[in-house]
Amino acid sequence: MRKKTAVVTGGAGFLGSHLCDRLVAEGFKVLCLDNLITGESKNIAHLKNDPDFTFIKHNVTSYIGIKGKVDHILHFASPASPVDYLKYPIQTLKVGSLGTHNALGLAKEKKAKFMLASTSEVYGDPLIHPQTESYWGNVNPVGLRGCYDEAKRFAEAITMAYHRVHKIDTRIIRIFNTYGPRMRMNDGRVIPNFIYQIKIDKPITVYGRGKQTRSFCYVSDLIEGIFRLMSESFNEPVNLGNPKEFTIYELAKLILRLTKSKSRIVFRPLPEDDPKQRKPDIARAKRLLSWQPKIGLEQGLKSTIEWFGLKRP
């Protein structure tokens, strides 16, 4: 019996590499595409000798040519942290537009199922709380973060256009803050930022007064939701994230406690268009997928801190 083939764009990134692991474990042949602009070879090094895994260095903003049958295309290619998309704004816009177009073209050619990794950033600085999939968002299209927010909003629009016009079997996931092993220490997201600052004995930097909220989903929970959605025939967006909400100040205090660090907290001005609240409504995922996160923040942070090699006293 032929194994199903899945193409994962951005497969050497944080989420993409965990997705490759899961697909190989589930019996798929996996083709991992990544140009390594923010992905890292070490994230997939353990898979290089697996006969069901193939790495192809490729920029998906160029035509994607794959020989043979393809069953699933999971489009995860994109810079995903503020440090990355502020450094690479044009590349971020291109991968969201041209890259998504090329990945959808491959899905059309191969008659494959297509999944888009979108983001909670399509909601911008939300005016409703928690965020439901029906909310259209509050996004500044010309702000510094617009390169990422609008790239993903365009990606969703073209995905739905291909679904309606070309009858591509599409999925859209809106990913809320996710963390865990393989995050880059310097990627600018809050959890690796705090751990890195503690590791080098620097004060923890909290923006504003730390009252802005986020909800943090451990990576294994997110991958489970993604895998379940692959088998569902549902084409509208689905929020995936942990609805348990924490202030950034609470997060900082928790990481300090878990690491037994004596680092102090310092406050800096809020970045432009930084969302004040972020919390997913996951009623749709619960109903469709019988899915909800299982890993609590403290448990997930302990695993992440250990992975980053932060020795606790």
Image (cartoon, grey):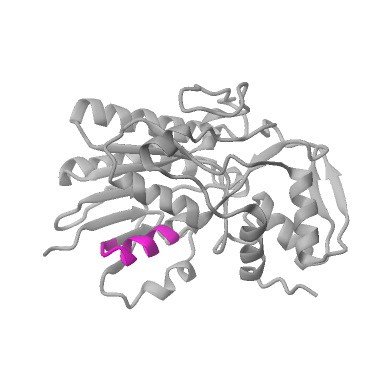
Give the left or right position of residue 183, taking residue 33 as reference. right
Tell which residue pokes out farthest to the left in this image.
1
Q: Which residues are magenta?
A: 18-30
Q: What is the x, y in percent for residue 178?
A: 56, 50
Q: Is residue 100 magenta?
A: no
Give 169 or 245, whichever is nearer the viewer. 245
Q: What is the x, y in percent for residue 86?
A: 60, 43
Q: Quadrant of the N terminus?
A: bottom left
Q: What is the x, y in percent for residue 152?
A: 46, 35
Is residue 76 in sight in this rendering? no
Vertical comparison of 144 with 294: above or below: above
Q: Is residue 25 magenta?
A: yes
Dominant secondary structure (helix, strand or loop) of the stretch shown in magenta: helix
Residue drawn at 31 percent across, 29 percent down: 160
Tell which residue pokes out farthest to the bottom in this image.
49
Q: Quadrant of the C terminus?
A: bottom right
Is residue 221 in sight in this rendering? yes
Vertical comparison of 313 with 239: above or below: below
Give 298 or 263, whichever is nearer the viewer. 298
Vertical comparison of 224 with 172: above or below: below
